[in-house]
Amino acid sequence: MVLSLRDTALRVAVSSARRVPGRVRFPLQRDGVHPVPALEASRQRGDVVQLMRLFGTRVWLVTGYDAARAVLADGDAFANDVRHYIGRQDRAPAERIGGLGMTDSPDHGRLRRVLTPYFTRRRLVELQADIDRVVAEALDDMAATGPVVDLVARFGFAVPFGVICDLLGMPGVDRDEFRARGAARFDLNDGTAGIFDTAAGTRQFLIDLVASERREPHLPEGLLARMVAEHGADFDDVELGGLADGVFLGGYETSASMLSLGTWVLLQHPDAWEMLRRGEPAEVDRVVEELLRFVCPVQVAFPRIARREVQVGDRTVRAGDVVVVSLTGVGRDPARHVDPERFDPTTAAAGTLAFGHGLHRCVGAELARMELRTALVALARRFPDLALACDPADLRFTELAIVHGVKSLPVRLG
């Protein structure tokens, strides 16, 4: 791709930015689990508004459900490949940006076909026993550590991290280091440059693991070993390591935030907590779907670039414009939800966009749902009297991040 001077300036600005401009921070901020007032003020201006202009490029923000769904589904009018803007393709392989979220056809289909067979319904059913075991181990650890524990570390992070390590067949890793690295990769307090710098370490670990497995197979049965054995001839170490990195990061960081923030919400809604304790499948499904809407830790979808002039809502988006979908805003769209600021599982609606939509919908969406159902039901049954062990005002949340979370959640086991 030949870049114009405008594109080159935009690429340098985005990939090396040390801070996000204050006036456009609000899509990446929350008040607890709620949108900040500035996001709601943006909605009052319309479901699609111009967020900013950067070197002549207009950046649009979408908060309306219908407009968001249309943008996310339209792979013809919008491109996901923004690597020439924000990637560091001239740097070491581990520092390059890519993966499913930032590729278009045919590359996207070629990469996704590697992962899809491992996330079929049949394969996921086979994982249920592993999920049950990881959850039980986390609950036993909480019981042994209590009566007061940090639910973020002992449960929110421990469960998805254990599940994803089992799925990949990864050897023992430093969990504290990977937890810190995972959170830092979505933290924009130091601008976009910090994200790229942090990502290189974990991605290089997985690239090296793939290379080692290719030279001498030694990993236990798991996704990493299977990818190398089945697709090693068609993909290089960087591609397979990048896919593994996407599964690894997406498989624990977002689920960790969802479990932790979701539990905090549930502790304020005893009726929903009781629904989980009863464990009736239909009730549990409604609680999980409503949590996905209400909490939705992934605040914005991957940015889209308009390939041509296209109508988005009541706005005309020109070729080259960037469109950002606020998943936080979409979940609170009053045109879709009668009382969007209220957590109410009895009114939970299907069709959440928390996992994206269309070709780029999260490949691990159903695995995430399985984890949430299993973990939250087990938590409510094991500790029915679970309660917050601090003043809610003392809780600290991420300040500016793509994936929102709570840093610590002290709970009393009861």
Image (spheres, rainbow, N blue to C red):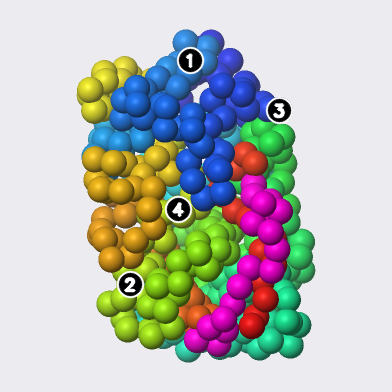
Dot 3 or dot 2: first in sequence order is 3
The answer to if 383 sits in the magenta stretch is yes
Q: Kindly identify which residue carries mark 1.
A: 53
Element assignment for label 4: loop
Instruction: Please state which of the two labelled residues, at mark 4 or mark 1, is closer to the viewer.
Output: 4
Other-residue count near label 4 (Cα within 10 Å), few / some / many at <14 / 14–19 / ≥20: many
Other-residue count near label 2 (Cα within 10 Å), few / some / many at <14 / 14–19 / ≥20: many
How far, Cα to Cα, is label 4 from label 1? Answer: 27 Å
Q: Kindly identify which residue carries mark 3.
A: 18
Residue 409 in the image, given as x and y percentages of width and height: 66, 64
Residue 122 in the image, given as x and y percentages of width and height: 33, 81
Q: Give the residues in magenta.
A: 381-398
Q: Residue at x 34, y 22 (%)?
A: 45
Q: Are marks 4 and 2 in contact (CB under 8 Å)?
A: no
Can you tell which quarter of the image residue 210 is in? bottom right
Give the label on residue 370, or none: none
The amino acid on which the numbered mark 4 sits, given as a three-letter code, is Cys
The amino acid on which the numbered mark 3 sits, given as a three-letter code, is Arg
Front position in the image: 412 or 360: 412
Element assignment for label 3: loop
Left or right of residue 48, residue 153 in this image: right
Q: Kindly identify which residue carries mark 4.
A: 296
Other-residue count near label 3 (Cα within 10 Å), few / some / many at <14 / 14–19 / ≥20: some
The amino acid on which the numbered mark 2 sits, given as a three-letter code, is Asp
Q: Are marks 4 and 3 in contact (CB under 8 Å)?
A: no
Q: Main secondary structure of the magenta part?
A: loop
How far, Cα to Cα, is label 3 from label 2? Answer: 41 Å
Give the label on residue 285, or none: 2
Regarding residue 66, the answer to whether it shows in the image is yes
Asked if residue 203 is positioned above or below residue 38 in the image, the reply reads below
Residue 282 in the image, given as x and y percentages of width and height: 27, 77
Q: Residue at x 40, y 20 (%)?
A: 50
